Image: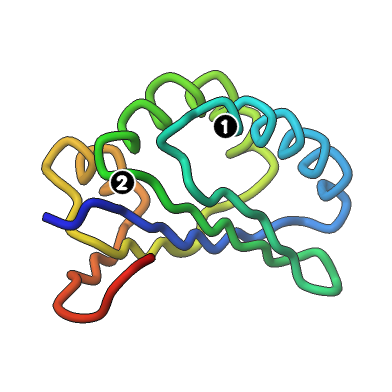
Amino acid sequence: MSAYVSNLFTLAIEPKNFPAFAALVSEIVAATQKEPGTLIYEYSVNADRTVAHILERYRADSVVSHVDTTFAPFAERFLSLAKITGLVVYGNPDAEVRKRLDPFNAIYMESFGGFSR
């Protein structure tokens, strides 16, 4: 199993919802920044603010905690402002991680070569 799990979420956002979404993201980022096992947690948006990506990288043992503890209080508001249209997962997440990511129709890309620093 890889020591890390990386996720790339694709989100659809109504432009009118972007200001509220951006404010919520600030709250989520502040909470997530306190997690020692979260190595990358970045949001990006296209020019017309209709598509956003979340790039995440965790130590493999930290994904469940992020989903269950940090993200859970924000989930309802988040999903009312953005629709998850895609999720690609890199690494080799265990069954507990997959249980949290499967509801988002995750596509799992298993590591088979390369390196991380």
Q: Is residue 23 above or below residue 92?
A: above
Q: Are marks 2 and 1 in contact (CB under 8 Å)?
A: no
Q: Nearer the viewer, mark 2 or mark 1?
A: 1
Badge 1 crowding class, 10 Å Cα cut-off, few under 14, some 14 to 19, many 20 or more, is: some
Q: In this view, does 8 lie above or below 75?
A: below
The quadrant of the image that shows the C terminus is bottom left
Say which of 113 and 68 sits in front: 113
Q: In this view, does 88 lie above or below 28?
A: below
Q: Is residue 47 above or below residue 66?
A: below
Residue 43: image quadrant is bottom right
Q: How many labels does the image show?
A: 2
Task: Looking at the image, tell me whether mark 2 or mark 1 is earlier in sequence order.
Answer: 1
Give coordinates of residue 36: x percent, y percent: 46, 31
Amino acid, disc 2: Leu
Give coordinates of residue 61: x percent, y percent: 25, 36
| Residue under label 1 | 32
Look at 70% across and 62% down and name the residue there: 44
Say which of 87 and 32 sits in front: 32
Q: What element carries label 1?
A: helix
Say which of 67 and 111 sits in front: 111
Q: How is the image coloured?
A: rainbow
**Left or right, 38 with reference to 64:** right
| Residue under label 2 | 101
Look at 66% across and 36% down and name the residue there: 29
Say which of 4 and 93 sits in front: 4
Look at 80% across and 44% down and name the residue there: 22
